[in-house]
Amino acid sequence: MTSTDLARAQFAFTSINHFLFVPITIGLAVLTALLQTAWHRNGRDEYLRLTRFFGTLLVINIAIGVVTGIVQEFEFGMNWGAYSRLVGNVFGAPLAMEGLAAFFLESTFLGLWLFGWDKLPRRVHLLTIWAVALGSALSAMFILAANSWMQHPVGYVMVNGKPQLNDIWALFTNPVFVWGYAKVLFASLTTGAVIMLAVSAWQLRHRGDREVFTRSARLALVVLVPAILFTLLVGDELGVIEGRYQPMKIAAAEAQWTTCQPCSFSLFQVGGGNNDHTPTKIIAVPHLLSLLATNHWNGQVTGMGPLQSQYSRQYGPGNYVPNVFIQYWGMRAMAYLGALVLLISAWGLLLVRRKKLATSRLFLRVAVWGAVLPFAMNTAGWLLTESGRQPWIVQGIMLTKNGISPTVSTTWLWISLIAFVLLYGALGTVDLILMLRYSRKELAPPRAETDLDTPVPAVQY
Amino acid sequence: MNLIPFWFIVIAILWTGFFILEGFDFGVGMLHDIVGTDDASRRAAINTIGPLWDGNEVWLIVAGAAMFAAFPGWYATMFSGLYLALVLLLAALIVRGVAFEYRGKQDAVRWRRSWDVLLTTGSLLAPLLIGVGLGDLLHGLPINSSQNFTGSFWDLLQPYAVFTGITLVLICLLHGATFLCLKTTDGMRNRSWLLARQVAPFTAAAVIGFIIWTHVSASTTFFLNVIELLAVLAAIAALWLVYERREGFAFAATTVTIAACILSIFVDLYPNVMVSSTSHAYNLTVHNTASGAYSLKAMTVVVIVFLPLVLAYQTWTYYVFRKRVSVSDFRPAVPSPGATPAQKPAPEAAAPPVRPGS
């Protein structure tokens, strides 16, 4: 493996892992805040018990989300030194803003929320969990602004071959950012809601408190249905926008080698890949690709072949085709899993209307196992986005292979890769054990009527 | 106005803020197993920093990100040069951060003792490695004409850098011990004070040695500058105040000591940001690593708006959690009416809860 391969493998490994925990944090923080708001407004004890129950799951995940986030920040300098040197004055700005405006907020108020139960007035304490939710959502905003700049660079001028920031607002009005961030928010809400639904379903199946967990399952479903629907709709629009700025990414997602108009969408294909230009497409839905990629019934999608020759003329000889296998199947895994989540959630909502949610054993079983779906969906989505940008690290400005740290040896890269794999493997296992254990815990017993006005004890380490 | 020196100051402040705040977290992390004689007292020690450590650690993240945004060349050379040290640092920060959250989540003795070991090790390694890195900035690393580090891992472990790391560990120990004096009660408080007394002479000696070494290697003047002098005086004051058992003033003195030591590195570094031991012509300076004027201006607006805000709500956090932590809060639930056992359901809760009226 070359240094570039190793650096890429490491970044992919650490960021995929990081993004297993981030959407739980963003989604579950909002849901926990909603539960606590419900308790604050109607004073019913079961909402407090649910807040504490799901708050514990939230905290178990935030811990890993935070520490794996530090790795992300350090990796740019460690493995991608040439990249950092070239684009730091554009790309670094949103990262620094993230720390100052978002990460401080999230971390400080998390401590206040956990330890402040019996020290803050209830109203103020409620605000702290909303501050955590806001902080984590803002954090994703700045990171997405930085990432979107790599997909579609805006707001800069080239000075001596170096991009120089000349419009910070452009980073936040970048269409790739606006739609990409909306998608991450909805996908995070989806993830959090699916987790809450799965845990509630497990509890309902195993004689957990029926009335209380029916409430949390209903809240999860009410959030989940619009969240997954918007994830899919926003994702569709994001595809059109990326098709405009990164046509190669979209062409590869359809394994479309030649230009077509109108274009059909294949449900799946046999064969394909970077060397097989004539895969057998199974069940081609006419016009669907045109619609997905351009929003027009008869829209034209430029194939990878013509794009390759165009880029070779524009940027010099080289291979500008990303890994077609990852693109094609990443796109499908994301879309199909998203559709599956939508179906499950619609089914759940139907059961809620018929008041059969707590008794449908089949649905509860499906909902428990549904917990894995959003993680596979999110990972597939990021693979599609990031692998589809290749061979560029910044579209049109710098190639990935030119972005690595020139004097970091492959030995160092191997050492760090192995270290992170071992560390994350151990952490992931511990996190999973704790998540399962705490999801299956019995809900705290209701407080005696006489205790309802006394302060709630703080969470302690 | 030229924003380049301003951003160098901002970064120096961020690093200083990080060590003032996270310094005692590191100290408490290293000491929790020594000052704590049983699980309850170890938990009490950890909970003195429980609500605070996470917000404190963000200072490091922001310091790193600010270097990335304001001095990309510095960030790139430093992070790729210190590579293996940073891998170790990340591992230390990861296990330490997770240890806080996970230690109390299971009751098994082996589980808790394992996290104790990881917390202690992580809290020791982190300031040591950061100290080595900061020492390397000042004392010089092999850096070539295109600003790339050309040495090996062993080049990082030069005597001055290692001594900087050890000094920071010793200051963090004393800073953590004086913090524990302020935040615990009774026996814990006494043990913390005894620990502070044992550590203080070593810390003071290390700080004096570190300041002299720093001055000799980085400065051409004979006399110490103000910051260096402050570090020496504060370290001696801390030693005296610990022996006098003036806990509040002792903590103030360790705060000034740690701040002055970090600042002295940056003061002696300026206008360089990384010294090249290959040739001084290759030194990284604030000028040959800085971002464009527009980026610095945009970032300046952000830092002027948000840093005071952060300081305000972090100060408020310290005010909210100003009370001392008592070991008795962590003893297994004894049937006393005022005690608040930590979310442990009573044994009879094993039966499905019956809701009145349902």
Image (cartoon, grey):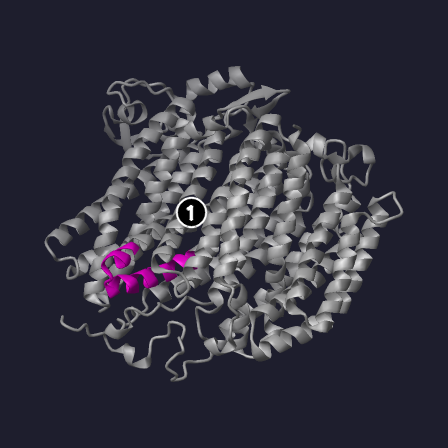
Observer-nearest of A33 and A410? A33
Query: What is the magenta range?
Result: A37-61
Is residue B141 in sight in this rendering?
no
Q: Which residue reaches farthest left? A: A354
Q: Which residue reaches farthest right? A: B222
Observer-nearest of A303 and A143? A143
Where does label 1 land, which residue?
A136
In the image, residue A36 lies at what x, y percent? 31, 57
In the rendered image, the vertical position of residue B156 relative to residue A167, given as above or below? below
Q: Amino acid at mark 1?
A: Ser
Judged from the image, the secondary structure of the residue bearing numbered disc 1 is: helix
Task: Identify the residue shown where x is 52% and y is 72%.
Answer: B44
In the rendered image, the vertical position of residue A449 relative to residue A363, given as above or below? below
Is residue B261 in sight in this rendering?
yes
Task: Identify the residue shown where x is 37% and y is 60%.
Answer: A121
Where, by quadrant of the figure, is residue A431 drawn? bottom left
Inspect the magenta stretch and tell me whether residue A55 lies in it: yes
In the image, residue A326 lies at what x, y percent? 41, 37
Task: Identify the residue shown where x is 55% and y is 70%.
Answer: B45
From the image, give the main secondary structure of the stretch colored magenta.
Answer: helix
In the rendered image, the vertical position of residue B51 relative to residue A292, given as above or below? below
In the image, residue B187 lies at what x, y percent? 59, 80
